[in-house]
Image (spheres, rainbow, N blue to C red):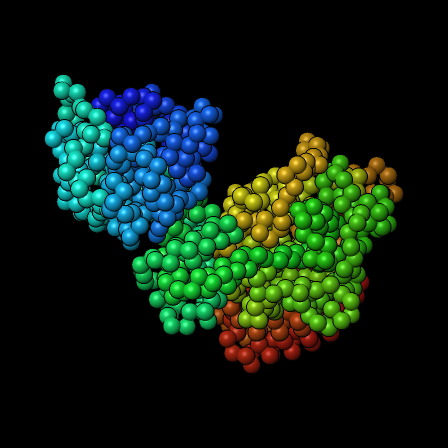
Amino acid sequence: YRAYHLFRSYGIPEENIIIFHYDDIAYNKQNPTPGIVINEYNGTDVYKGVPKDYTGKDVNPSNLLAVLQGDQELAKRGKKVVNSGPNDHIFAYFGDHGFPGGVSFATGSLYATELNAALKRMHQDNKFAKLVFYIDTCESGSMFYKLLPDNINVYAVTSSTPTEPSYFWKYDKTLKTMIGSWFADHWLIDDETNDLEHETFDEQFKYFADLWNVTDPDAPGEQYAQRYGNMTFGKLHISEFLGHKPHNSVLIDQARDSEQHYSAVNKWDVSLYLLHRRIDETNDVLEKQKYTEELEGLLNARHYADKHMTEYVNSIQHLIPNIATNAILHTKQELNNHECYQKLVNTFNEHCFNLSQNTYLLRKMQIFVNICEEMRDSTSAIPLSAQLTQANNVTKWVLLCAGSNGWENYADQALVYRAYHMFRSYGIPEDHIIIFHYDDIAYNSENPTPGIVINEIGGPDVYKGVPKDYTGKDVTPKNFLGALTGDQQLADQGKKVIKSGPNDHIFAYFGDHGSNDLVSFATGILYAKDLNNALIDMHSKQKFAKLVFYIDTCHSGSMFYKHLPDNINVYAATSSLPTEDSWFWNYDKTRGTYLSAFFANNWLENDQNFDLTKETFQEQYKYFADRYNVSGATQHAQHYGDMSLGNLYVSEFLGHKPSKQLQQTVDKYAQNYDAISKWDVSLDLLQRRIKFTNDLHLKIKYTEELEHFLKARQYADNHMTEYVKSIQHLMPNIATNAILHTKQELNNHECYRKLVDTFNENCFNLAQNTYLLRKMQIFVNICEQMRDSSDADIAVNRLIQHCESNANQEFHKIL
């Protein structure tokens, strides 16, 4: 904008200046002065009066080359182009991001070979007498180095060498962004402050060359301007291209900026830099937290990109045996094999990441330079490109499991039914979705609408069409792990299993009850150690490229906390902390049960309402994390494992929502957003039945059931208290009350598992007595006092004796 006004004032006619600008900053929501753009501290508005020759998506490489060459198709559409002839002078400037042999637009990339080919054609077609081209991007020298001839009357100046970054500078605290660029700013300062009728391009280049030290008291850098092409142009006066400065023009007052802090940042790192500045400058705690979370997401994204590139290089190392992986990743070879290089960059851009929107990855294009310089045979690039495509041509698998049974746990099965239909509509094939559900609610005697299951009040039936992959007593921990890991014995029995390979993505969801380091099925228990060992084993056997696991149970965080490694390509999100309840919600009076669960409902609503091709798992997790208030209680979602996977798009696992698909909406005001801890759902439902019935006989019946139920809980509490007292002598350093009521962190997993297994086999079936799951914390507390395995063995034997002498089968059934 500043350059436009400058050269207009120097006499360049309006019709002879063509300007490309995306035009998204003047009225950007982050602009505190809407409609005003500045390029200097406290400077004047440079936006007003700027024409909109090419804006938005019209700012693309194709249009730039066409305008430069005077494309008549564009001219016929009323667009401005350079209508130059053999006696004309052309000056062109380009500023953005760059990479080896290319520059980036917001809408695509322009290769050096394409630009130089266009300049050669223009020379052959007598489209100019002389042409000067300035470029300000990282590695801008690579746009002309060894490519621009010295005999086509073109002279080019670049902000940096072919392998060097360029810098933004002048951070404005009010705008919270950089307002200048080191090279371009000094170009315009030079044009403003010197007599262009006397200054030559040689003199201006010397001015640039002397400014190699990028001034920044915090992080000084270096940037060496370069020039290419016909060096005789250096003797030409700048006014021959950019016009004549009015004799009465006032020199820019540089003194007013002399005390400003001229911060500078490598263009590739500007997003990172701005987040750091915002964190440092804000005094608002919530804003600081927001920016810190954004910074964490950005760093995780960079880590993921680094990892992605490393894995790719490792996968093709056999094709380049004469150079080590580390050398490919970290050295800088000179680009000569342009054909191979462009194949890889195009493939990466189309199948992996959009380079225009992920500027950090532009610096990674040097890796493709290094690879291609090891492959002088052009055909060698074909398997490299194919490998890159294959690495991103993933097969998607989805595993959905509701581990519970019983009318009180209606929500668990309703949720996986809803999820099944959603992901089928998003394109996941029938044979790539496996669903576990006990299948006892659709035709349950308590269901007022037999054969129909809903997940929202007034919502559609989600049961119809759901396959019965694993139902009833087949819904077990063993079968769940078998289906996940692709167990061949299950497959031989005709059961669906995940038959995944090294390039595949797997998404798994589990909903039921849980406790410390375990989740419960209606038929048994799955321990955190067993689940994580299965994931580690799958990774070692290359059964997936990436795996995402969501769990919605009480204490669900304990399934991954200190268990899940961060280097096996697995990312997990849980409904709650390792020591926190999770909640059912949306009570339906008609059915007398809860229809949904807080975490899983938020997950599916998010999937329905957002564009999954643009939403990342990190963004989805933030959506969960921001929703921690459950009808007055709290439930804090957590995430674990490889955080870099949080930067993957949800669609890479769950498919693509049809663009015209309309979500079937329900009346939100009809929903009842009451919530209850999953552990207390049976108690809550009894209390509601007493409250809502007008039938005196039923009220008496439910009251008697509630009284019996509370006695059963009291019996369980007494049972646990008496047991702890019976082994108190083994734990002299802690009081009985502390064992019963505090929450220590679980570390002694071996002891804990022995006690839980013993309790489950000899005392109460935990899968059918969910109230007792909350009592497993007592075993955690005991084991954290027993570092000697012999004491743990005594505690286990005493538990067996205690249960045998105190079992009450009546209460056992009620609990």
Q: Residue at image x 74%, y 69%?
A: 490
Q: Quadrant of the N terminus?
A: top left
Q: Is residue 21 above or below residue 683?
A: above
Residue farthest to the right, as pictured: 697
Residue farthest to the left, as pictured: 198
Q: How many marks?
A: 0
Q: Residue at image x 50%, y 55%?
A: 645
Is 783 situated left or right of 175 in this image? right
Is 53 or 485 nearer to us in this picture?
Answer: 53
Q: Would you say residue 804 is visible in this rendering?
A: yes
Q: Residue at image x 46%, y 59%?
A: 308
Q: Is residue 759 above or below residue 89?
A: below
The percent position of residue 103, horizontal first and vertical second, equals 36, 45
Is 420 situated left or right of 251 in this image? right
The percent position of residue 266, horizontal first and vertical second, equals 29, 47
Residue farthest to the top, as pictured: 248
Q: Would you say residue 811 is visible in this rendering?
A: no
Q: Quadrant of the C terminus?
A: bottom right
Is 351 or 247 nearer to us in this picture?
Answer: 247
Q: Is residue 497 above or below residue 141?
A: below
Is 270 or 673 nearer to us in this picture?
Answer: 270
Q: Residue at image x 19%, y 29%?
A: 239
The percent position of residue 265, horizontal first and vertical second, equals 28, 45
The percent position of residue 150, horizontal first and vertical second, equals 24, 46
Is 215 situated left or right of 289 in this image? left
The quadrant where residue 502 appears: bottom right
The quadrant where residue 517 appears: bottom right
The quadrant where residue 264 appears: top left
